Amino acid sequence: MADAAKALSGLLSGIAQNVYHEKEEMTEDLLRRELFPDLSEEQFRVLFDKMRGLLKSIATADMDHAQLEAFLTAQTRRQGSGGVTPEQAAALSRFWKSQRVRVRESLLAQSRWEPGLRGLSWRVDLQAAAGRADAAHSGPVALVELQLGRAGQDSEFVCLEFDEARVNQMLKKMADVQESVDRIVQHT
């Protein structure tokens, strides 16, 4: 019984390593050989697909404890090969309680297609006029440096230069964004 529980926990960990943490060496064949050598390939395939499907359902819904328990209770009560045994439900519950945060972080990282903002720095420069010809260009200039990047990659830097009119225009747009966010937050 303890060996079966350990094997199920190992299977769930292996599935998570492959699906959510992109460890390609954690193959279905390796899991079968190491954890369930007594099962035929077909029997293991059924178990593997069922556990992977359940884990994906749980992860996609980002189930909390109450949702997980209700889901597993419903799965345990199902008749036929689609349901889970109480031992499988217990293994899924233990696994999800310990790995929920890591799986969620992995799903979030995988869902980001564009680089994210890692940092922002700014300063205001005053340009000194050399003569009357430069008088039109002697106002303050805001310099904004954005640090962009994806997880696991080096950052890229973008430098933007704004005169006073552009700063005011950008602040107006940011106020519009803030209003939209506030409206959405108030409705939920």
Image: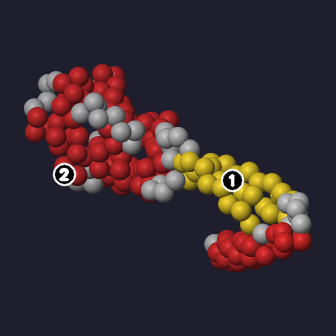
Q: Is residue 16 left or right of residue 50?
A: right
Report the amino acid beneath label 1: Glu
Q: Quadrant of residue 130?
A: bottom right
Could one spot residue 105 in this view of the protein? no
Residue 140 drawn at (x, y percent): 85, 64
- Quadrant for the N terminus in the image: top left
Q: Nearer the viewer, residue 136 or 85?
A: 136
25 relative to 157, above or below: above
Q: Nearer the viewer, residue 162 or 97?
A: 162
Q: Nearer the viewer, residue 58 or 148?
A: 148
Callout 1 environment at 10 Å: few (<14), some (14 to 19), or many (20+)? some
114 relative to 98, above or below: below
- Quadrant for the C terminus in the image: bottom right
Q: Nearer the viewer, residue 35 or 71?
A: 35
Residue 147 drawn at (x, y percent): 62, 49
Q: Quadrant of residue 49?
A: top left
Report the amino acid beneath label 2: Gly
Q: Which mark is residue 145?
A: 1
Q: Is residue 72 left or right of residue 149?
A: left
Color encoding of the figure: secondary structure
Q: Is residue 116 left or right of residue 125?
A: left
Query: Which element is circle 1 on?
Result: strand
Residue 16 drawn at (x, y percent): 37, 39
Q: Quadrant of residue 2?
A: top left
Residue 51 drawn at (x, y percent): 29, 43
- The residue at the point 70 percent across, 75 percent down is 173
**Could you tell which of marks 1 and 2 lies nearer the N-terminus?**
2
Residue with the mark numbered 2: 80
Q: Which mark is residue 178?
A: none
